[in-house]
Image (cartoon, helix red, strand yellow):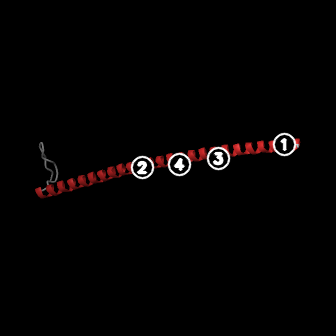
Amino acid sequence: MMKVGFGYFSRGRSYSSWQTLQDNRAKRAAVLQQAQANIQAAGSSISNAMLNHISGGANNAANAAIGRIQAEGRAKNAAALKQFDAAQTLLNQTKTSSTGINTLA
């Protein structure tokens, strides 16, 4: 048997008020569950983005510190090399001087 509806009346099987209430509760529960899943997914995405940003900042800070340490090491090596060159030059001058003195003697 088919019902013919006008306006807000529906065609087909009619539900009792209790069944309509149960259907509406089930639909609201499904909508709430989906909303909670969406919120959780958004929270996870934001959390991951924040962790990536923090770890990226930490990596940048570590790289900057390594760069400063390497620059300091290069500066110390250059100073030591300059000192070594000066000592080598002085040694060569001393050898030349002593060789010159022995020749004259």
Q: Name the residue under label 2.
A: 52
**Which type of secondary structure does the marked residue at label 1 adopt?**
helix
Nearer the N terminus, badge 2 or badge 4? 2
Question: Disc 3 versus disc 1: distance between alpha carbons?
Answer: 31 Å
Quadrant in the rendering for residue 15: bottom left
Question: Disc 2 versus disc 4: distance between alpha carbons?
Answer: 21 Å
| 68 vs 87, nearest the viewer | 87
The residue located at (75%, 45%) in the rendering is 91
Label 2 is placed on what type of residue?
Answer: Asn
User: Where in the figure is residue 4, as x and y percent of width and height?
Assistant: 13, 46
Q: Name the residue under label 1.
A: 101
**Is label 3 in contact with label 4 (beta carbons under 8 Å)?**
no
Q: Which of marks 3 and 4 is in front?
A: 3
User: Where in the figure is residue 22, as x and y percent of width and height?
Assistant: 16, 58
Question: Disc 2 versus disc 1: distance between alpha carbons?
Answer: 72 Å
Residue extending farthest to the front is: 105
Query: Which mark is on residue 79?
Result: none
**Which type of secondary structure does the marked residue at label 2 adopt?**
helix
11 versus 16 height, above or below: above
**Which type of secondary structure does the marked residue at label 3 adopt?**
helix
Query: Which mark is on residue 66?
Result: 4
| 67 vs 92, nearest the viewer | 92
Quadrant in the rendering for residue 19: bottom left
Nearer the N terminus, badge 3 or badge 2? 2
**Few, some or many residues within 10 Å of mark 1 (<14, 14–19, 20+):** few
Q: Nearer the viewer, mark 3 or mark 2?
A: 3
**How many numbered circles does the render carry?**
4
Question: Disc 3 versus disc 4: distance between alpha carbons?
Answer: 21 Å
The residue located at (36%, 50%) in the rendering is 45
Nearer the N terminus, badge 1 or badge 4? 4
